[in-house]
């Protein structure tokens, strides 16, 4: 009995090739093309099947084929010789043919070997996509988001810590979501895109590591520009020239680093293609783009694409908007000498505008203007040519550089009277200046981030005598990041003015990135061996074994990575475990010094003088001792191929530790005692006559957050029902997330009622726990001959519970007024002696859907016309459903009814 094996889109039998299989290969230095004649000789060879329609034979055998001149040729392989073949498709698809007219085109995201999920071909258009963030909404655990391009977009995987892709007015924050969003690595053509050098914040010295800067909310909508510490803003990546996307939510190969949550790999290609014009419209957003591929010659191709998008939060007004322009050029070359090269260049701009509402006298203005330029080159050289069999078959290099200018401006009017503010850059007691009684407060952040990424690797493969196949690689990775911007600066009193004597505040000063920020460097070495073994009983073992060493800002991490699977006919069992790490960003490392301003006295005599006596204490603010955050990722799964489709079930347990969080630091200053001399109308003078201890709190970014994500993930891809021309897909996920700060990172809270015995109560930090379950169906009616797709997607919100602010109401200690800290024994913390320190238990909150489930339906209709036009219509929330939880509040993760359209034309 013959057994058929599917390799890509090519069928082989145990008795040889099917008749008329077209191949091309090099033999004795000559390129040969022809049609394989069915025979049993190749069975005697060791057959190694590779991806992308490639395979090779090794061993003693003969291969008979008919060449392009219709003559028979016999290729004889001796023991130890190899023959590499490229299998050519049986059907030649004319240049410019729409994928929608091709039978078997991929319509849904599909799981690959281990944790990889592939989105390619028509699946990229399942949802109306203005950026890569829209495409990723079809992954397990994700859902169709409320449409809004005026807020930055990122993504997290396998967690219940927040909305997976940010939507309108629903930007999750906090250490849970922030650490996960920060830990996602985005790569384009195996070159990392980095947001580690982004420093567009204003008060990183005093805020949390995942605070939101320069945002506004008003009648015209919500505006939140791209943020540091949250990963790459997905709005900046258009889908115009993307060929495929691969998402790894589990354990990546050792080649990939600087991540803790997941990996997104985007692939673009250059090939001959007709000029295509695209236009999209949805609510207040429109986008136009063009793409053209040139076949320069047989081995060289050039692709050029351009894209412009304009988005308004509310189409009825232009108060809040976002613009994006992209220009990309990609050249690829593959010569007979074995040298391959893919060179890309990109220039992009994006602006976020939040105009002042004419009806709001105190309205805020936000202006963001970003420009970036990037270069990337993927170059490789193949030594395995003309029958050569070196130990290392290929050497490759991936090199990328990006440079950007980022200017963020915030302006609003203040009318609060003249107030004193601190301006000393050192420890001193001095006369402080005053703000004008009424003025426009301005704050700026000027950044010029530079990022360089390089990866060098050598690769080979070997088949042992017992038919174990090894595909091995060794590599070196280097990352460099810096910021040469002017930094943070602004007008007088930047959020730091004081009203009355005895008040204090965390002061603000100008901070120059170019002079104060040191470059960040990461080095890595890795080794990977991907092993395949086919046994006599046709069972197949696969094991991807890797080890990576990272040196990130002087901290070392050894990261073992293992993925395994064992295939027994239609059943596959798989498992994996691995360690990953993520280096801190420049914005977390270099926060500027912390200034504490204390107003000792404010003396004014109208018409004669205003004298404010200020004391400033400066604490170094940089966090150069921050370590990388780390994550252990573990998963097991089963795959089964039924006659009607394939089902994949995965269970995972991920632990994040050394995550970035905020610690309250108790500081003690020697507050000056001053005598003030007032004589007539002369400016008062002062002298320092002593000091007294004064305690205050400051925030600092530290490694001290840990969390656990555990859950199940189900994917099912069904074969096309030919009688109905219907393709059905399904995915579902269930996940529990819990997070807390490390022991010893306490919270300090002053008692509500002043108590002479306690200045501050000391408490364990709050804990959070979230549970989420979602599912999604896709139904795609595909009539290839007519060029028609009608797609229906459903989103099912089955469970969504968030328990936040869970805290111990009893103190673990307290601070005396003299500065001495007392620890309360655990068995004495409920003693009524400390009742003034007891917290209210009502701070605990339960939110989400409670016990309610919600369901939403979305529609896509795409028609391809032979004239070259293609029209798509998208409708979100087809039935105009309104979603409320059990408490009667609107559920923010449920998208409202929205209409969109896309039209394209191929010349």
Image (cartoon, grey):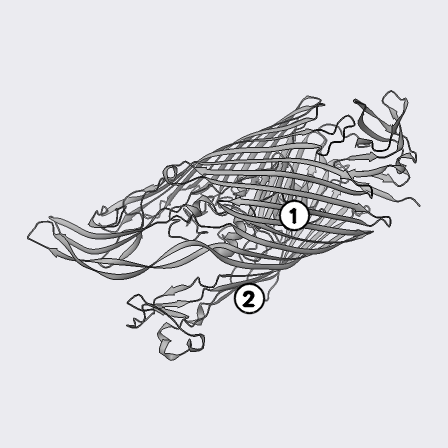
Earlier sequence position, callout 2 versus callout 1? 1
Does 537 sit left or right of 686 as displayed? Answer: right
Q: Position of residue 445 (x, y in %)?
A: 38, 41
Give the labeled residue for mark 1: 859
Label 2: element kind: loop
- Tell me if 738 is positioned left or right of 757 in this view: right
Identify the residue position indicated by label 2 in the image: 886
Of the pair 624 and 897, the residue shown nearer to us: 624
Nearer to me, 479 or 654:
479
Locate residue 292 relative to residue 887 in the image: left or right. right
Q: CA distance from mark 2 to mark 1?
A: 28 Å
Do we see residue 843 in this rendering? Answer: yes
Secondary element under disc 1, as helix, strand or loop, is strand
- 2 or 1: mark nearer the eye: 2
Residue 368: x, y in percent?
A: 42, 39
Q: Position of residue 785 (x, y in %)?
A: 77, 36
Q: Quadrant of the C terminus?
A: top right
Residue 879 picture quarter: bottom right
* For residue 665, above or below residue 816: above
């Amino acid at each position: 009995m013959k057994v058929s094996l599917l390799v890509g889109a090519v069928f082989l039998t145990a008795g040889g090739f099917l008749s008329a299989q077209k191949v091309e290969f090099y033999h004795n230095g000559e390129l040969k093309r022809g049609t394989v004649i069915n025979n049993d000789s190749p069975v005697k060879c060791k057959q190694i099947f590779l991806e992308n329609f490639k395979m090779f034979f090794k061993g003693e055998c003969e291969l008979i084929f008919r060449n392009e001149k219709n003559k028979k040729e016999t290729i004889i392989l001796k023991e130890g010789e190899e023959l590499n073949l490229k299998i050519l498709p049986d059907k030649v698809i004319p240049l410019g043919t729409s994928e929608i007219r091709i039978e078997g085109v991929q319509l849904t995201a599909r799981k690959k070997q281990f944790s990889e999920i592939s989105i390619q071909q028509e699946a990229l258009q399942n949802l109306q996509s203005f950026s890569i963030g829209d495409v990723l909404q079809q992954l397990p655990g994700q859902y169709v988001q409320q449409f809004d391009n005026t807020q930055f977009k990122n993504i997290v995987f396998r967690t219940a810590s927040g909305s997976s892709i940010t939507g309108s007015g629903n930007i999750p924050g906090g250490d849970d979501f922030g650490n996960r969003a920060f830990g996602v690595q985005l790569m384009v053509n195996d070159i990392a895109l980095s947001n580690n050098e982004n420093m567009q914040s204003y008060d990183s010295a005093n805020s949390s590591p995942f605070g939101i800067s320069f945002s506004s909310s008003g009648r015209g909508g919500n505006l939140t520009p791209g943020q540091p510490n949250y990963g790459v803003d997905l709005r900046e990546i258009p889908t115009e020239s993307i060929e495929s996307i691969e998402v790894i939510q589990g354990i990546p190969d050792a080649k990939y680093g600087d991540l803790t949550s997941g990996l997104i790999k985007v692939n673009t290609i250059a090939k001959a293609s007709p000029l295509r014009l695209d236009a999209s419209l949805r609510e207040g957003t429109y986008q136009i783009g063009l793409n053209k591929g040139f076949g320069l010659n047989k081995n060289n191709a050039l692709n050029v694409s351009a894209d412009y998008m304009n988005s308004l939060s509310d189409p009825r007004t232009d108060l809040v908007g976002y613009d994006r322009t992209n220009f990309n050029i990609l050249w690829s070359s593959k010569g007979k000498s074995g040298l391959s090269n893919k060179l890309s260049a990109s220039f992009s701009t994006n602006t976020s505008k939040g105009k002042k509402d004419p009806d709001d006298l105190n309205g805020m203005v936000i202006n963001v203007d970003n420009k970036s330029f990037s270069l990337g080159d993927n170059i490789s050289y193949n030594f395995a040519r003309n029958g050569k069999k070196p130990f290392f078959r290929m050497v490759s290099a991936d090199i990328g550089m990006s440079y950007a200018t980022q200017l963020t401006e915030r302006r609003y009017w203040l009318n609060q009277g003249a107030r004193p503010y601190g301006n000393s850059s050192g420890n001193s007691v001095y006369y402080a200046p005053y703000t004008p009684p009424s003025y426009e407060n301005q704050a700026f952040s000027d950044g010029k981030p530079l990022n360089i990424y390089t990866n060098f690797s050598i690769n080979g493969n070997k088949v042992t005598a017992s038919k174990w196949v090894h595909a091995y690689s060794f590599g070196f990775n280097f990352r460099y990041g810096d910021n040469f911007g002017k930094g943070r600066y602004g007008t007088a009193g930047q959020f730091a003015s004081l009203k009355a004597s005895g008040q204090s505040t965390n002061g603000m000063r100008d901070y120059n990135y170019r002079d104060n920020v040191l470059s960040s460097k990461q080095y890595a070495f890795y080794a990977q061996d991907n092993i395949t073994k086919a046994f006599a009983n046709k069972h197949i073992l696969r094991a991807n074994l890797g080890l990576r060493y990272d040196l990130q800002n002087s901290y070392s991490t050894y990261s073992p990575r293992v993925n395994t699977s064992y295939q027994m006919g239609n059943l596959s069992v798989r498992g994996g475990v691995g360690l990953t790490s993520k280096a801190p960003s420049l914005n977390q490392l270099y926060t500027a010094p912390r200034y504490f301003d204390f107003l000792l006295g404010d003396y004014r005599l109208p018409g004669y003088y205003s004298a404010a006596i200020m004391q400033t204490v400066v604490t170094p603010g940089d966090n150069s001792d921050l370590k990388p955050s780390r994550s252990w990722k573990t998963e097991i799964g089963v795959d089964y191929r039924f006659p009607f489709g394939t089902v994949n079930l995965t269970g995972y347990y991920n632990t994040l530790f050394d995550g970035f969080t905020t610690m309250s630091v108790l500081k003690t200053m020697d507050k000056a005692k001053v005598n003030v001399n007032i004589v007539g109308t002369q400016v008062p003078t002062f002298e320092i006559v002593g000091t007294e201890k004064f305690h205050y709190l400051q925030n600092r970014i530290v490694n001290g957050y840990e969390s656990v994500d555990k859950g199940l993930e189900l994917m099912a891809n069904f074969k096309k029902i030919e009688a109905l021309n219907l393709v059905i897909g399904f995915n579902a996920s269930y996940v529990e997330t819990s997070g807390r700060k490390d022991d010893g990172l306490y919270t300090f809270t002053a008692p509500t009622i002043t108590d002479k015995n306690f200045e501050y109560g000391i408490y364990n930090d709050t804990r959070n726990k979230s549970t989420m379950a979602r599912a999604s169906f896709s139904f795609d009616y595909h009539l290839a001959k007519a060029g028609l797709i009608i797609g229906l997607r459903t989103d099912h919100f089955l469970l969504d519970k968030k328990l936040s602010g869970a805290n111990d109401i009893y103190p673990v200690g307290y601070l005396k007024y003299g500065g001495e800290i007392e620890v309360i024994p655990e068995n004495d913390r409920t003693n009524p002696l400390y009742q003034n320190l007891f917290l209210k238990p009502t701070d605990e909150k339960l939110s989400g859907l409670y016990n309610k489930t919600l369901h939403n339906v979305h529609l896509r209709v795409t028609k391809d016309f032979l004239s070259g036009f293609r029209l798509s219509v998208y409708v979100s929330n087809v039935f105009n459903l309104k979603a409320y939880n059990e408490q009667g509040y609107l559920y923010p993760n449920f998208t409202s009814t929205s209409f969109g359209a896309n039209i394209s034309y191929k010349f």
